[in-house]
Image (cartoon, grey):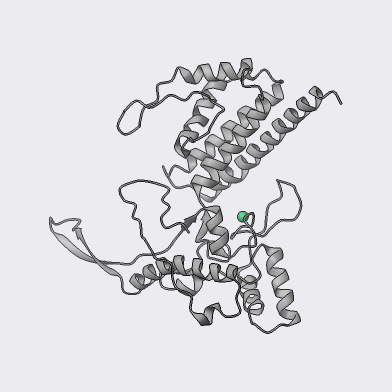
Amino acid sequence: MTVLNVNGTVLRSAGLVCYVPEATAAQMSGRDAVEVRHLLRQGCINAIVGRIETIARTGFACLLPHLEQAVTKSYCCRPFLCCMQLDSKETYAYAGLRSERCCPWCRLRPGRSLFRTAREHDRAEITSLWAVANPPVRSAARRAARLRLGRHGWHPTRRCGLLDVAKSCLLPGPVGGGVLRGIIGVDVLHGLYIAWNRYLFGTLRKLLPSETSKARKALDSVIAGFVLRDPETGKRQRNLDSLLGQEGLTAEKRVMLMVLLATALGTSGGVLGAPREIVEAVTQSVASAEVVFLACRGHRSYTEDELSMIFKDQAMLFFGSLAKVMKYADEQVMRMCPN
Ligand SMILES: [Zn+2]
């Protein structure tokens, strides 16, 4: 079990070390080991949420400088729980999802199409299904509720304990979507900086499979000319050897590779040596990824229309372009095969 997993190392971040909670004999009776593990996991995060909840009820005193007079004044502050950025594995385990590909925001979609939008979970429906699915007595209604939960992407019996613990520390009013009030989300680091980069660079590696090809050498020669420096200290960093190789790189370096890739491709993208529409698809996917990455840097807040343009339209363009490149790369491989 991970004790501490921090995505950033800024001075303001704080780590909280917890000990594994104890499961009582009453909790363990009639449960198998996997269910007990789920109980313990819930206990770990609930211990942290419970701490925030206790402080949220009464607030805490905070000495802050007065805005107009040169004195410090005591304020009563209350913490609110707005977001939990968990890894995909932890989201699946803590939110009580059916599998890692399920989402706490929207319903599991059947079928394979990338471009069909998923419907948001109905909070009232899932909450009532949980109530019917949990009693120990077998019944046809319990079975039906468990099956329905599974179809929506939730585990039939393992339920998230967040809403049982967090009451005062949640923002009042209709905030957030999904069943868990939008608190459990996909984090930017894994969901975008790592995953999107992997999709893009993986596709490019498929397009240019030979490491000694002219196109790859040309791309690498462009990045060899850059001097990389730490943005805060200005200290010189180790140069990247290859544009398409990403082994052992941090998420920040991957973001930087994306920017370098745009420079290396140039406006024409002629270096790829592929047909015009494929080059256009590659440059489009790089451009869309850049828009989304830039929007996630916290520079400013966006309106609803802008958010829809950034995350919906650009995501469609990104995945649509990658699908086009993938298809072309597959056709190239098929052409090489004698049979
Ligand atoms: Zn979703």
Residue name at image x 53 percent, y 63 percent: 94
Residue 62 image point, x, y percent: 23, 63
Residue name at image x 18 percent, y 58 percent: 66
Say if 257 sits above or below 319 in the image: above
Q: Quadrant of ligand 1?
A: bottom right
Could you tell whether 151 is left or right of 247 in the image? right
Question: Given the current orientation, which residue lies at the most extreme bottom position?
Answer: 137
Residue name at image x 71 percent, y 64 percent: 151
User: Which is nearer the eye, 247 or 304?
Assistant: 247
Q: Is residue 228 visible?
A: yes
Say if 45 sits above or below 227 in the image: below
Residue 126 image point, x, y percent: 63, 71
Q: Where is residue 261, by image quadrant?
A: top right
User: Which is nearer the eye, 110 or 302?
Assistant: 110
Residue name at image x 69 percent, y 66 percent: 150
Could you tell whether 29 is left or right of 73 in the image? right
Q: Is residue 268 visible?
A: no
Say if 154 sits above or below 221 in the image: below
